Image (cartoon, helix red, strand yellow):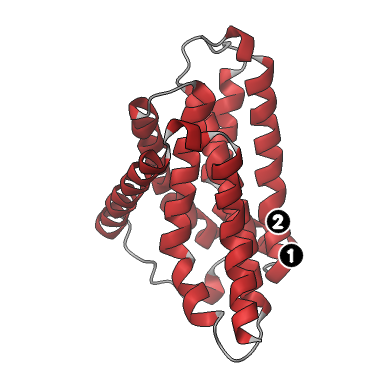
């Protein structure tokens, strides 16, 4: 039972990444090593973000019970560091050769795979192999799928933003979507203030998946409708 639970969690977490790579045409471009290079850039970016947080954003000493809006304000400052991911994606996007959609797939998938390995592989390996079944690890696996969509969407938005031939009327929409993706981690705290309690489990997953899918659909619509003007 333990082995099957662990296998299900691994398949649920890593399966979409493998299928995205295999059936998106990326193997024809020899994109595996390029994705690995993107993953290396992801690790370097996270290291820079941690140094920045440790230097300029010391941890809050206030008691948790006085949180609410003060905590959200402090979290906004912390999450703002995630604009470093936008900078990292921009650097990688400029160095990855190929057509636009291949650049987006390589950058987004490489970034998401590195995030999966560094943030979720160890909890799954240690926890999902335990003797007791726990829905928490199914939720971690599902969250990995949401993260894949999120990072592909971020790569697409960064690619759109740096297009010089993008329509001027669309550029503010791209900027708003990009900022929404960066500040998405604030959503659980905002829901906790509005609803009086922090969403947990599958409710939290649904709260994270809904804006991710909405922004991804809007970004894809922009890409498709303006693809004729891209050279």
Residue 204 position (above or below residue 64) = above
Q: Residues within 10 Å of mark 1 (few under 14, many from 20)?
A: few
Looking at the picture, how far across and down is residue 160, in whole percent? 52, 23
Q: Looking at the picture, how far across and down is residue 162, in whole percent?
A: 45, 21
Characterize the local packing of mark 2: few (<14), some (14-19) or many (20 or more) Cα atoms within 10 angstroms. Answer: some
Q: In this view, does 98 lie to the left or right of 194?
A: left
Vertical placement of residue 66 versus 169, above or below: below
Question: What x and y, as percent, mark residue 66?
Answer: 54, 71
- The residue located at (65%, 45%) in the rendering is 212
Front residue of 226/180: it is 226
> Could you say whether the residue bearing mark 2 is in a helix, strand or loop?
helix
Where is residue 225? Give x, y as percent.
69, 16
> Do we see residue 155 in this rendering?
no
Q: In which quarter of the image is residue 96?
A: top left
| Placement of the N terminus among the 4 image quadrants | bottom right
Q: Nearer the viewer, residue 166 or 227?
A: 227
Q: Residue 142 carries which label?
A: none
Residue placed under numbered mark 2 in the picture: 207
Most distant residue in the front direction: 28
Residue 85 lies left or right of residue 178; in this view the side is left
Depth check, front residue: 123 or 28: 28
Against 5, residue 139 (above or below) is above
Q: Residue at x 49, y 26 (%)?
A: 159
Q: Residue at x 49, y 49 (%)?
A: 112
Residue hosting label 1: 203
- Residue shown at 45%/55% (left/top)? 115
User: Do the residues under discs 2 and 1 have CB atoms within 8 angstroms?
Assistant: yes
């Amino acid at each position: 039972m333990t082995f099957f639970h662990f296998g299900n969690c691994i398949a649920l977490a890593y399966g979409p990444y493998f299928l995205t790579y295999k059936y998106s045409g990326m193997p024809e471009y020899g994109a595996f090593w390029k994705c690995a290079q993107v993953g290396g850039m992801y690790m370097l970016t996270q290291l820079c973000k941690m140094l920045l947080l440790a230097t300029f954003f010391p941890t809050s000493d206030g008691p948790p019970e006085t949180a609410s809006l003060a905590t959200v304000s402090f979290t906004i400052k912390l999450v703002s560091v995630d604009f470093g991911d936008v900078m990292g994606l921009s650097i990688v996007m400029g160095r990855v050769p190929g057509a636009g959609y291949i650049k987006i797939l390589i950058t987004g998938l490489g970034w998401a795979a590195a995030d999966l390995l560094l943030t979720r592989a160890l909890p799954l390996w240690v926890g999902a192999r335990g003797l007791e079944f726990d829905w928490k690890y199914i939720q971690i696996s599902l969250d990995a799928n949401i993260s894949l969509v999120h990072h592909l969407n971020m790569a697409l938005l960064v690619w759109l933003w740096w297009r010089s031939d993008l329509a001027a009327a669309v550029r503010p929409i791209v900027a708003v979507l990009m900022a929404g993706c960066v500040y998405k981690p604030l959503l659980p705290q905002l829901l906790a203030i509005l609803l009086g309690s922090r969403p947990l489990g599958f409710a939290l997953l649904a709260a994270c998946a809904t804006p991710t899918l909405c922004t991804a659909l809007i970004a894809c619509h922009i890409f498709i409708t303006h693809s004729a003007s891209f050279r």
